[in-house]
Amino acid sequence: MNKTDARIMDDNAAADILDDEVETGLDGVSALELTLTAQAEDHGARLDRVLARLAPDLSRTRIQRLVAEGQVRAGGRVVGDAAGRVNAGEVFTLLLPPPEPAEPAPEDIPLAVAYEDDHLIVIDKPAGLVVHPAPGHASGTLVNALLHHCGDTLSGIGGVKRPGIVHRIDKDTSGLLVVAKSDKAHQGLAAQFADHGRTGPLERAYFAFVWGVPDLRGTVDAPLDRHATHRQKMAVRPSGRQAITHWQVMETYAGADGTPVASLLECRLETGRTHQIRVHMAHVGHPLLGDEVYGQGFRTKATRLGAEARELLAHLNRQALHAARLGFSHPVSGAHLSFESALPPDLSALRAALSIPLRTRADVRG
């Protein structure tokens, strides 16, 4: 493989999302199952209103959340729209999670600490680690690990469920994020993330392996909102909030037939919306490798890869996205801090197996 920019480090090199949501789910064994039948007077009414009437102990907001989490079924199918209309006699099954502790408990979970002082801590998060407790993830999260590592020094601004959490990256995205240990640090960091680096020093860069070969540089400026029917997904919709992603091609990879099949991009966020990079790149026809939510239509592309790359992708079990660079002004001292994270072993191995790059950053600069 040709040498690329030194900032892309392999997994043996030393390493110096904003609001991506964590995935949710319930353990069906421990969940309470509630069965409700729509009455004649319910015909044509909104689902969330009907269920709230039939189960008065549940608020409409709670029911809407259960629908969004895929925990409401009708006739064995998952109901995807809380505003959908109900038929008389329709039977609905709700799976309710067991009660969760009011406050997360400290857990001895290993952390890769890139930097730490009295005011903040920078973590290099592995894929698979949820950032904070949520339905179906009451424990085993980054917050549980931080409570064990930092004790009671985390900022309380985020509340008991999200102490110190200023921004998030998705459960299955690896890489860097900063956590506040003091309220002053939390306020200062939050202001920088709200500015998204437009006028301040905040810098966030992600490495994304995508299908196909986009233009060498490009920008997606497309608003993001909840999907109209699949509420766990995001989509480009006119009703959404502004979202801007800039990309630059780092490497292009040939398939088994010698023609370009995939690329490595550096993506920079000008905003920080849920699943932003994943949705935006799928929107322009270049979804991320391994993304089962937004790249399902590209599964057959894997047949064009070499045998090793195809095997590694089949066992990746996540989107090929890594938060590789994070820079910001220290909210107390004012010093500029910048951190880089090497590609983790799974993505480093995938990159090595994607054959010799047809084009590298040196060509891009030329």
Image (spheres, rainbow, N blue to C red):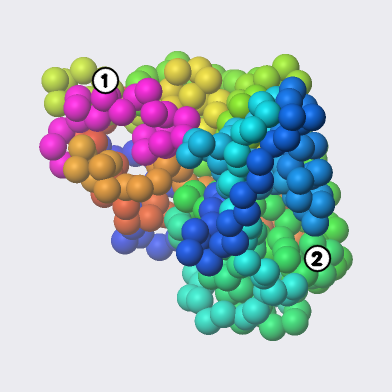
Query: On the picture, is 79 further left or further right than 351?
Result: right
Judge whether residue 18 is colored magenta: no
Which residue is pictured at 76% across the width and 37% down the height? 50
Callout 1 crowding tier (Cα within 10 Å): few <14, some 14–19, many ≥20: some
In this view, the residue in front, 25 or 85, is 85
Q: Can residue 28 be seen by looking at this rendering? A: yes
Question: Where does the C terminus fall, quadrant-wise?
Answer: top left
Disc 2 secondary structure class: loop
Question: Where does the N terminus fall, quadrant-wise?
Answer: top left
| Image quadrant in which you'd find residue 151 | bottom right
Q: Which mark is residue 260?
A: 1
Quick check: 202 above or below 266? below
Q: Can residue 21 be seen by looking at this rendering? A: no
- The amino acid at mark 1 is Pro
Tell me residue 150's x, y (percent): 67, 80
**Which is more foreground, mark 1 or mark 2?**
2
Tell me residue 173's x, y (percent): 49, 49
For the residues marked 1 and 2, what is the alpha-carbon distance in whole angstroms? 48 Å
- The amino acid at mark 2 is Gly
Residue matched to label 2 = 159
Which residue is pictured at 61% across the width and 41% down the height? 92
Tell me residue 143's x, y (percent): 64, 69
Boundaries of the magenta span: 288-308
Callout 2 crowding tier (Cα within 10 Å): few <14, some 14–19, many ≥20: few
